[in-house]
Every structure is written in C-alpha cells, then in structure tokens.
Amino acid sequence: MTKRLGRRFSLCALAFAAALAVPGAARAEGGKVEVMADVVLASNNGDKVDPPSLEEMKATFAARNIKFSSWQSVSQRRLALEPNKTAEVPLPNAKRAQVTLQSVKEGEAHLKVTVPPSSTELVLGREGKLYVDGGQHQGGQLWLVISPAIKPPKPPPAPAKQ
C-alpha cells in the first residue's frame, strides 16, 4: 500500500471514528436534517488559526498525529437535507462534495458523503463533528466539516395588546 493510499484510509477512519463517538440525534424537523458544512484549509504554511474556534479541530487532529500549523475557514453553509436528496458543497479545488441524507434511525442522521474519487457513510448525532477529506489545495489539505446546525433562539413573544 502506498503512503498516500494509507493516509487516505487513516483519514477516512478519522471521519468514521469521530462519527461513532457522537451521541443523540442531528437536528431534524419534518423529515429534514439541518447541518452546517464548513470547508477548512489545513496546511503547514504559517501558523495562523482563523477563526480561533478552529483550535479545537487542530487539537483533535494533533491527538491523532495529524499535524498542520495553519487552519483557515474557507466557506460555511447551512444545508437542509431531505431523505435521499443530495446537497452539494463547492470546494475551492474545483471538486464538489455531495452530502445525502440516507435515513434518520434511532435519532441519528445516516449520511453518505462523496468527495471524488471517494465516498463514505457516516452517522451524525446532536453533538460532534464529522471530518471528511476534501483533497489537496494550495499546498494544504481541504476538510469538509459537517456538524449539527444550531438554530438561533426564538425571539420572545410580542407583548399582548391591551
């Protein structure tokens, strides 16, 4: 097995291991599951972490001996996934990540995520994040980070008219 191929398998294993560690269910309403899809560029070009919330991702990867010194958010989008329908997330390396909600079972969203040439099936709960290899870009590695969408709090009810 080549080093590149071995690394690809270990990165997929990272995504799968992160998925299994998540309890509960993704945010689901009327058959839809809402998730955030963040695209992050990790590299060893500099030591900037932007935004600072990516420090958590940096530490998660470092604990698995995957070390990059620079972490930068590239894009963020909210996806409303419906069963067996595919949502696409454009990546800056001209690839398109495809996220498909396969089912919601026992409070967990079962997703199929495809970033050519590979595809993987993951499980997302109410908490945690899934990390999917998005391929090489500008001397670094793109990551698609899928997490439950957190709805903003509902505004307080309007005062009753008298």
Image (cartoon, rainbow, N blue to C red):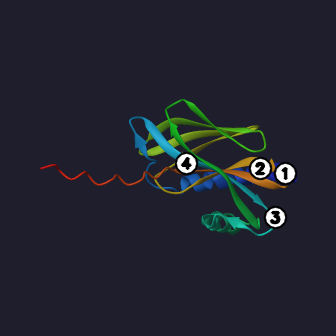
Q: Secondary structure at mark 4?
A: strand
| Contact? badges 1 and 2 (CB < 8 Å) | yes
Residue 2 location (% of width, % of height): 87, 50
Residue name at image x 81 percent, y 64 percent: 44
| Contact? badges 1 and 4 (CB < 8 Å) | no
- Give residue 7's quadrant in the image: bottom right
Q: Amino acid at mark 3?
A: Asn
Residue 4 is labelled as 1
Work out whether residue 101 or residue 88 is closer to the camera in this orientation and state it: 88
Q: CA distance from mark 1 to mark 3?
A: 17 Å
Residue name at image x 16 percent, y 49 percent: 161
Residue 70 location (% of width, % of height): 75, 65
Residue 19 location (% of width, % of height): 57, 52
- Mark 1 closeness class: few <14, some 14–19, many ≥20 residues within 10 Å: few
Residue 36 is labelled as 4
Which residue is farthest left?
Answer: 162
Q: CA distance from mark 1 to mark 2?
A: 6 Å
Q: Secondary structure at mark 1?
A: helix
Residue name at image x 42 percent, y 53 percent: 152
Q: Secondary structure at mark 3?
A: loop
The residue that label 2 is drawn on is 8
Question: Of label 2 and label 4, which has the lower sequence position?
Answer: 2
In the image, residue 137 sits, relative to residue 100, either above or below, namely below
Query: Does 128 sit left or right of 98 as displayed?
Result: left
The residue that label 3 is drawn on is 44
In the image, residue 159 sits, relative to residue 29, either above or below, namely below
Q: CA distance from mark 2 to mark 3?
A: 18 Å
Q: Secondary structure at mark 2?
A: helix
